[in-house]
Image: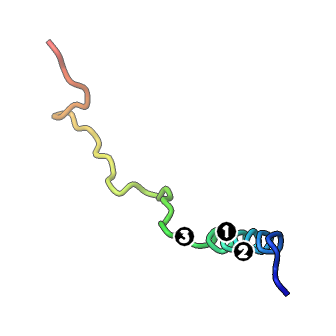
Amino acid sequence: MKPDAYTKSVLTVIALCLVVLVLRGVDVLPRAVAGGAAAYPLVPATPSCPSTPTGP
């Protein structure tokens, strides 16, 4: 029994769909997510070092 072109194309589409379903669950690159606390906390301004520049 020789499979015809229609059967080959249907089986190819099914195989491609299965590959897509499998690859959806695989993380090739890790996803970037926002963290909780900042890695570098802000330093408060002191009176000897004002946060706004003074001009003439």
Residue drawn at (62%, 71%) of the image:
23
Q: Of label 2 and label 3, which has the lower sequence position?
A: 2
Residue most extreme to the right = 1
Amino acid type at image mark 2: Ala
Q: Of label 3 and label 1, which has the lower sequence position?
A: 1
Element type at mark 3: loop
Q: What's the distance in space between the residues labelled 2 and 3, CA to CA?
A: 20 Å
Q: What's the distance in space between the residues labelled 2 and 1, CA to CA?
A: 9 Å
From the viewer's perspective, tell me whether residue 16 is left or right of residue 43: right
Amino acid type at image mark 3: Asp
Residue most extreme to the bottom = 1
Element type at mark 1: helix
- Closest to the camera, between mark 2 and mark 3, is 2
Element type at mark 2: helix
Could you tell me if the residues under marks 3 and 1 are in contact, i.e. CB atoms within 8 Å?
no
Q: Which label was assigned to residue 15? A: 2
Residue drawn at (83%, 69%) of the image:
6
From the viewer's perspective, tell me whether residue 13 is left or right of residue 31: right
Q: Which label was assigned to residue 6? A: none
In the rendered image, residue 37, in percent from the top left (x then y), is placed at: 43, 57
From the viewer's perspective, tell me whether residue 1 is left or right of residue 17: right
From the viewer's perspective, tell me whether residue 8 is left or right of residue 42: right
Amino acid type at image mark 1: Val
Q: Which residue is mark 1?
A: 20
Front in this rendered view, residue 5 or 36: 5
Q: Which residue is mark 3?
A: 27
In the rendered image, residue 24, in percent from the top left (x then y), is placed at: 64, 68
Question: Where is residue 45, by image quadrant?
Answer: top left
